[in-house]
Amino acid sequence: MEIKIIENNSIKTAILTSNECLITNLNEALDLISNAYYQGAEKLIIKKENLIPGFFDLKTGFAGDVLQKCSNYRMKLAIIGDFSKYKSNALKAFIVECNRGNQIYFVDSEQSAKEKLR
């Protein structure tokens, strides 16, 4: 799992550079979050491809568990991808609600992720 650290105004952001599915369970998510935290990052950017598809099925509870870990570590998270293919109204509402907050964002590009995480 390769993480690139960028710094802006003394605040570090960790970017998971892989395009592969690397987060298939809560322990892997926690490893990534704690690795970023250990490197001094306060923010994390990942791609939707890094997450097991079950993350986007809210019935599994996986998304809630991952977001709770981010909250526990005070790690802001941006997930990059095209989320329009998901038909679940619950997921769409979840994404809208997250994007209204200041902790978790679902965005369409790395540039958007960096802007949201400022």
Image (cartoon, rainbow, N blue to C red):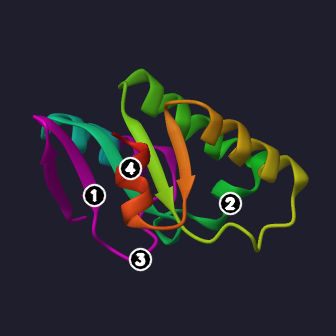
Q: Earlier in the sequence, mark 2 or mark 4?
A: 2
Membership of 78 in magenta stretch: no
For label 2, the crowd category at 10 Å Cα-Cα, with few meaning under 14, some 14 to 19 and many 20 or more, is some
Q: Position of residue 96 (x, y in %)?
A: 72, 44
The residue that label 2 is drawn on is: 54
Label 1 to label 3, Cα distance in Å? Answer: 14 Å
Q: Earlier in the sequence, mark 4 or mark 3?
A: 3
User: Which residues, given as a range, are shown in magenta?
Assistant: 1-30
Q: Which mark is residue 15?
A: 1
State left or right for residue 5 relative to residue 76: left
Instruction: Identify the residue shown where x is 57% and y is 53%.
Output: 106
For label 3, the crowd category at 10 Å Cα-Cα, with few meaning under 14, some 14 to 19 and many 20 or more, is some
Q: Amino acid at mark 3?
A: Glu
Instruction: Identify the residue shown where x is 68% and y is 66%.
Output: 83
Label 4 to label 1, Cα distance in Å? Answer: 14 Å
Q: Quadrant of residue 42?
A: top left
Label 1 to label 2, Cα distance in Å? Answer: 22 Å
The residue that label 4 is drawn on is: 115
The residue that label 3 is drawn on is: 20
Q: Earlier in the sequence, mark 4 or mark 1?
A: 1
Label 4 to label 3, Cα distance in Å? Answer: 24 Å
